Image (spheres, rainbow, N blue to C red):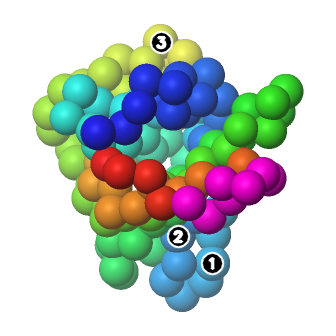
Amino acid sequence: MISENVKKVFAENPWFIATHGNELNVVPVGFKHITEDGKFAIGAVLLDTTLENIKKNGQIAIAVANPTTAESYQVKGKAELCQEGAAYEQYAKLAEETFKGAHPVKCAILVTPEKLIVATPNSRNREELPL
């Protein structure tokens, strides 16, 4: 189970997601949250290369860091693309409100975490935390 402190760092800071396929790709995302069942959800609006990479192999990494404290984490897992369900509906509504129809959400990316790793520059760096 992901601790409340780790969830807070993910909730309060931007995520950077990395994928690979025909080319490596890393992008920041703002439409994001951790679901009640522990999946990492992302609203895909302008993520063309990311989506193509996920279609190829489903692999994804998510990094987050608090710029004030340097508390940082990395998640590695499997991603699936969804065009229905609660996360998709949430991001479709948010994209409509934010971009007024100019950039609709393409899908929700749901990530099942396989590893949660401390990335903070301290003695716990690279420690794997329980999920």
First in sequence: mark 3 or mark 1? 1
First in sequence: mark 2 or mark 1? 2
Mark in front: 2 vs 3: 2
Residue at far top of view: 97
| Pointers 2 and 3 in contact (C-beta within 8 Å) | no
Residue 87 in view, yes or no: no
Separation of disc 2 and disc 1 at Cα? 6 Å
Which residue is the site of mark 3? 97
Residue 19 shown left or right of residue 43 in the figure: right
- Amino acid identity at mark 1: Leu
- Stretch of the chain drawn in magenta: 121-127
Q: Going 62% across and 64% down the picture, which residue do you hit? A: 126
Mark in front: 3 vs 1: 1
Quadrant of res 44: top left
* Pick the front one: 30 or 5: 5
Q: Going 31% across and 22% down the picture, which residue do you hit? A: 90
> 10 Å neighbourhood of mark 3: few (<14), some, or many (≥20)?
few
Q: Is residue 123 magenta?
A: yes
* Pick the front one: 110 or 2: 2
Quadrant of res 35: top left
Which residue is the site of mark 1? 24
* Pick the front one: 69 or 113: 69
Which numbered dot is residue 19? 2
